[in-house]
Image (spheres, grey):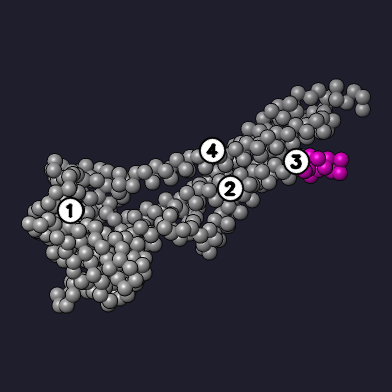
Amino acid sequence: MTRAFELFVARRYLRAKRKQTVISVITVISIVGVAAGVMALIIALAINAGFRGTLQRNLLGATAHVSILEKEPGYGIERWRELAHRVSRVDGVVSVAPSLYGQVLLSGPLQATGAVLKGIDIKSGQQVNDVLRHLKQGDIHDLARTTGLPGIILGSKLAHMTGMMLNSVVRVMSPQGELTPFGPRFTQQQFRVVGIFESGFYELDATWAYTTIKTAQELFSVSDVVNSIEMKVREIDRAPEIAAAVQKIAGPKLAATHWMEQNRPILNALKMERAVTIVTIGLIQLVAALNILIALIMMVMEKHKDIAILMSMGARHRQIRNIFVLQGVLIGAVGTVIGLALGYTLSFLADRYHWIRLDEEVYSLSYVPFNPGWLDGVWVAAIALTVSFVATLYPARNATRISPVEALRYE
């Protein structure tokens, strides 16, 4: 009953009469301020999570979680089959795939452009390279054809730039050719396009191409070696731990690295952006808290006679204090609910209909992804309500200091 009484009076005070128009306006501004702060923070966090999730998904879909590389460029990793078998038994490793990659020049009907040609093992490479599981065109198993020209799979942007289509013939030139008495000789070979992939990540779609390890070895004029052994792990967060275990097996001449280390700059940038966003947009909440503070101070000044009457009728100081605390919390709660509804709705629509377009060549993404998390909404709402509550403490305390005798002496 006591709580119901305090809530009833708090709600009555928020419904301003004509002579309290200024207080009503400030109350509305306070609600709008809280809603704007919550909405902006939800949208900003959704963008940050969207970028991080999309980049991580695209990168991990096309690259390895853990890789064994040469510490210094040399003649490649010898006895790589034995090494691949040994690391496959490490706890947490799902699949292992050797690869051989290098810079090449692709010459098509439209233009010639640089690319990275990666030789993969069809049996194990398909498990590591998720982008090749569902090709936009073609079939990955056509790479293993032994008749006719060797097969190659191009990224969609790379195929578009060079003018290549499915089943067309492309000429690939490698600067890493045979060494002759007159110096290194470029090697070139014709390939048939047997597939086109599209990962959604511009850098991959515009620069990468795939073939078999044997074909890559012939093009790069190397023996039976690879320059990378790539692994998929069951839990990506355990990648550093698994990389340390793999390093012991690989030996001192090779280096085991993981996806977090390879992409550390961009991950750190996204983490810093998230922190700066929270601090910057959090200032909106402080402005809203000041509005709540001002509204309640003016309310106490306006209602000092009512407060005196309530106290003379037996209302305790705690009840008077709770009345004004509940007013501020109600303002914060209404603003928080509105802000959450707007933030999640706008984030959903912006992600579904790609409202904000980007230049793929600069950002590697065609649009701004929004990925609002429910946990973000919980702690954002908690912070908004806490700030609103703190803003009520001073005016609520002043309300309990009103003396009924002094307030009603001249009435």
* Badge nearest the viewer, 2 or 1: 1
Q: Determine which quarter of the picture holds residue 388.
A: top right
Main secondary-structure element of the magenta-colored stretch: helix
- Asked whether residue 88 appears in the rendered view, the answer is no
According to the picture, the residue beneath numbered tag 2 turns out to be 40
How far apart in space, not on screen, are marks 3 and 1 (Cα)? 67 Å
Q: Determine which quarter of the picture holds residue 213.
A: bottom left
According to the picture, the residue beneath numbered tag 1 turns out to be 227
Q: Residue at x 41, y 58 (%)?
A: 361
Amino acid beneath label 2: Ala
Q: Residues within 10 Å of mark 2 (few under 14, many from 20)?
A: many
Q: Which of 273 and 233 is in front in this view?
A: 273
Residue 279: mark in rendering: 4
Q: How crowded is mark 4: few (under 14 residues within 10 Å), some or many (20 or more)?
A: few
Which quadrant would the N terminus be assigned to in this image?
top right
Helix, strand or loop under label 4: helix
Residue 76 rendering spot, x and y as whole percentages: 13, 52
Q: Read off the magenta span.
A: 10-27
* Badge nearest the viewer, 4 or 3: 4
Badge 3 or badge 2: first in the primary sequence: 3
Q: Residues within 10 Å of mark 3 (few under 14, many from 20)?
A: some
